Amino acid sequence: MIFHHRAKLTELHSRYLGWSWMPFLYLTLIIANWGASYRFGLRFEFAFYANMILCALMLPALMNRSFFHLLSRTQDEIIGDLSYPIYLIHYQVGLAVMAIADSLGFNMPRPSPMLALASLPAILLVAWLITIALEHPIELLRQSIKAYSK
């Protein structure tokens, strides 16, 4: 639904909230929401819905790429390619890191900032391997089938 109404959302967002600093503010608020809910034991429902609202507000802010002058098109594509594999495997890799840390004598409870930081390199590595080994070859196959069917 957000994609369907993206032109109107982009117009409203740029008119009332501006573009240059809003995505960074939203990201900061998302991280602060996670940290506050973890640190102060906020109710799960409140933190969950606050995160959903912030992420929904983030989408119109990201639709306009003009503020991304720090990222090239290639860097943006790499981040985009990794986003879905990260979404799929972050939980499993986090559990694996937690189990490996436990077998080595380190206690990393779930959730914890230490587990998140320790899991991040493994999550990025596994997501990159999935992208290189699975997604790119499948996309090449899809393109060749599309070209052949025309």
Image: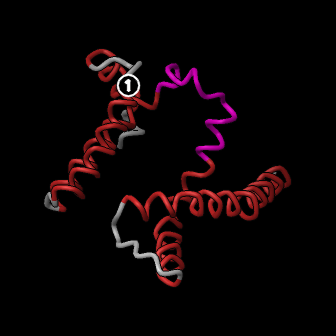
Q: How is the image coloured?
A: secondary structure
Closest to the observer: 150 or 39? 39
Residue at 65 percent across and 40 percent down: it is 77
Residue at 79 percent across and 60 percent down: it is 137
Residue at 31 percent across and 36 percent down: it is 57
Residue at 28 percent across and 44 percent down: it is 32
Is residue 20 a member of the stretch shown in magenta? no
Q: Mark 1: which amino acid?
A: Thr
- Taking the image as shown, residue 141 lies to the left or right of residue 47, namely right
Q: What's drawn in magenta, residue-wise?
A: 64-80
Is residue 69 a member of the stretch shown in magenta? yes
Give x and y (percent) for residue 79. 60, 44
Residue at numbered disc 1: 10
User: How many labels sit on residues?
Assistant: 1
- Taking the image as shown, residue 6 lies to the left or right of residue 133, namely left
Closest to the observer: 30 or 102? 102
